[in-house]
Image (cartoon, rainbow, N blue to C red):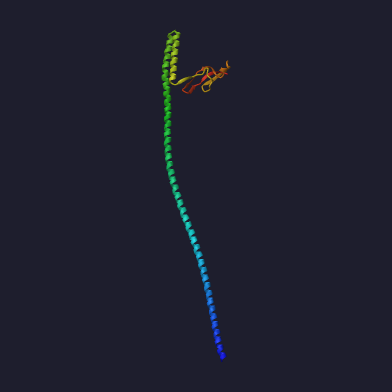
Amino acid sequence: MKEKESEIPNEEMNSEQECQQKHDNLSGDSDNNQVENDMDLSENDTENTQMEQNDAKEEEKAGDKKKNRSFFGRKKSDEEEKLKKELEELDIKYKELNDRFLRLYSEFDNYKKRTNKEKLDLLSTASEKVILGLLPVIDDFERAIDANGKSEDVNAIKEGFVLIYNKLQQLLKRFDVEEIKAKGEEFNTDYHEAITHFPAQKEEDKGKVMDVTEKGYKIKDKVIRYSKVVVAN
């Protein structure tokens, strides 16, 4: 009996130990499952955080692109406005310059016509003045011719011709007409025209004008007729 009674408690103890072991195993399993769940949650949180960070970066990039687009769009718009203003200013300047050119061209055309008319008037006036100056000389020639037909005094006739010649020289000086000096001067193609050459009798005569066959004249500095000369070689 006693043995049976001792076995019963042992069995109870064994059953209790088994229950306790099962409980411990179950609690261990639950703890492991909890740890695993916590790890899974942590991994999920990490993945979610990374995804959120990636989304934030993409949104930031998209925002930067949008800002860049708006910046460049605004910049392009500003450049277009600037170009439009420059084109308007250039158009205004072109119109002003074109108008000024037309005015200047018209004024120049009028000036050219006026100067041409003045030149023609000047030439006609100058020739008129010369003719008016020559008329008294012609009158003197006519009187001298009449007198020569009636007079036999040779000296008086010569004096009359000298007076007429001097009067004609004064008229030429009044119009700034001068005789070109030639005889004894160095031959100068600007004033002289050589019609012939002959050997020089002296060394110092070489290249000089020895004779004048036709006098030359100039008005101020302009040659109107070259002197025809003989040059010594």
The residue at the point 52 percent across, 77 percent down is 27
Residue 152 screen position, x and y as percent:
44, 7
The correct choice, above or below, for 183 with respect to 117 in the image is above
Indicate the quadrant containing the C terminus: top left, top right, bottom left or bottom right.
top right
The residue at the point 55 percent across, 84 percent down is 13
Residue 19 screen position, x and y as percent:
54, 82
Relative depth, front residue between 159 and 37: 37
149 displayed left or right of 184: left
The correct choice, above or below, for 5 with respect to 145 in the image is below
Indicate the quadrant containing the N terminus: top left, top right, bottom left or bottom right.
bottom right
Residue 66 screen position, x and y as percent:
47, 57
Relative depth, front residue between 66 and 134: 66
Residue 76 screen position, x and y as percent:
46, 51
What is the residue that sits farthest to the bottom in this orientation? 1
Relative depth, front residue between 40 and 118: 40
Relative depth, front residue between 14 and 115: 14
Quarter of the figure with residue 22: bottom right
Quarter of the figure with residue 187: top right
What is the residue that sits farthest to the top in this orientation? 152
The residue at the point 44 percent across, 50 percent down is 78
The residue at the point 44 percent across, 48 percent down is 82
The correct choice, above or below, for 13 with respect to 231 in the image is below
In the rendered picture of this protein, how many numbered marks are placed on residues? 0
